[in-house]
Image (cartoon, helix red, strand yellow):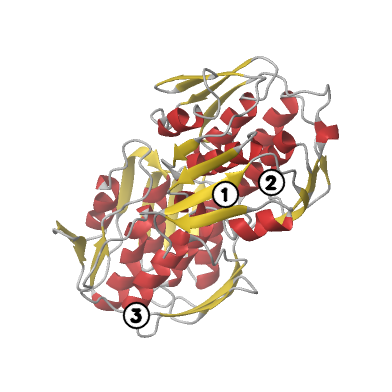
Amino acid sequence: MKKDLKAYIKGGQIPNGSVKVSGAKNAATRLLAASLICDDIVTLENFPTELVDARYKIDFITKNGGLIVIDEEKQSLVINVSDFKNNLLDDYDYPIRTTYLLAAGLIKRSGIAQIPYPGGCKIGSRGYDLHIMVWQKLGAEVTEKLDFIEIKAPNGFVAGEIDFPISTIGGTENALICAASINGETIIKNAYISPEIENLIEFLRVAGAKIDVVGNSFVKVHGSEHLRGSNFRVMPDRIEALTWIVYGILSGGKITIEDVPFSTMEIPLIHLKEAGIDLYRNSNNIIVSPECLINGSIQPFEVSCGTHPGIISDMQPFYVLLGLYADGISRVYDYRYPERLKYCEELSKFYPDQLKWEKGAITIIGKKSAKSAIAQSTDLRGSMALVMAGLLSNGESEIYNVEMALRGYNELEKKLSELGVSISLFQHE
């Protein structure tokens, strides 16, 4: 597993070529966890095999007896969990947030799950109390141990009703996977249905669970003790697609972005058009070039980040980066994660005096060029914004702990290389 990586970046490189959007991180790692409750072999296609988060999950699964065959060329996983069971591990230090999704498969096969505490990005409060609530509502006993969370349900989870006090992506994913393994009907209220969760629901239905979604927040799940395997395709990553679009616009290069999930990005793309960006597209691809700027420059804008179908919080840093090159003052608000600001201090090293931020609001003064800098990654998407700033700068930059970006961008070095752009990664002390 890659840790403590420093990126050395030479700015001013102009990208040219094609890049294919990988399977979505926020779908793939959930589908991998859902595969653990299936009784037959599962093949996940379009799986981003190089993602750091996925590799950590695969490591945990194999240490608990699961067999996973990784095909990097085909970008697929073959998952066999016939011998998957709970084992007491020597080490539970896994720096990924969605460890809670690993519980359902272990409970189904062992009646006990000892899972790492959720890690991941520090972008505000990320408690796991709602996951404990899910397990308890489904009949489990939960104990917080020194190194891991222990969930006990000797006879498996039992059907119940889960009423979330707030809309929650992670809680909804956890509840869906757990409920699908129960031979009975579970009700989930105040669920959050994102495109990635729709992908998860589709997978669970193929496996044999009956899932009814009423509106966008009420879900009925009638699971099964036996869930079949399948060949299932991971949806393309809408956040990665937006990343390449913004990079193409700002770099002055010409990039063809393949496999863009347009149906999940309607409103984010509307905001780009309102900023004076007219993208060339067909049903699957986008071509980004300098000709996309209608008036020759990016128009200043205001956007608010919240829930799907709008601009989600993970997209926030890329609109901030876009605003830094706009012809005027832009503003980005974030109502869902108002404390997602740590990366702004690092990004401002590339753009001195161009960023002002306070809880929930970022003001961006545009129309200046980036200067080279030495910066520290703070979170996944913020780290990618720093990499882009380095590429757009007029000198040589260093980004520390850039493995945070690799958690969400599959084959990043390779894709940049295919665009004629190189970055160098080194281990740092």
Q: Nearer the viewer, residue 413 or 310?
A: 413
- The residue depicted at 63 percent of the width and 43 percent of the height is 243
Q: Viewer-nearest of labels 3 and 2?
A: 3
Disc with the residue nearer the chain's start (3 vs 1): 3
- The residue depicted at 77 percent of the width and 23 percent of the height is 297
Q: Is residue 218 above or below residue 339?
A: below
- Distance of mark 3 from mark 1, alpha carbons? 29 Å
Q: Pointer 3: residues within 10 angstroms few (<14), some, or many (20+)? A: many
- The residue depicted at 59 percent of the width and 62 percent of the height is 234
- Distance of mark 2 from mark 1, alpha carbons? 9 Å
Disc with the residue nearer the chain's start (2 vs 1): 1
Q: Which residue is mark 1?
A: 195
Q: Pointer 2: residues within 10 angstroms few (<14), some, or many (20+)? A: few
Q: Nearer the viewer, residue 351 or 289?
A: 351
- Residues under numbered marks 2 and 1 in contact, where contact means CB atoms less than 8 Å apart: yes
Q: Secondary structure at mark 3?
A: loop
Q: Secondary structure at mark 1?
A: helix
Residue 84 disc label: 3
Q: Is residue 264 above or below residue 429?
A: above
* Amino acid type, label 3: Phe
Q: Pointer 1: residues within 10 angstroms few (<14), some, or many (20+)? A: many
Q: Nearer the viewer, residue 105 or 10?
A: 10
Q: Nearer the viewer, residue 143 or 137?
A: 143
* Amino acid type, label 2: Ser
Q: Which residue is mark 2?
A: 263
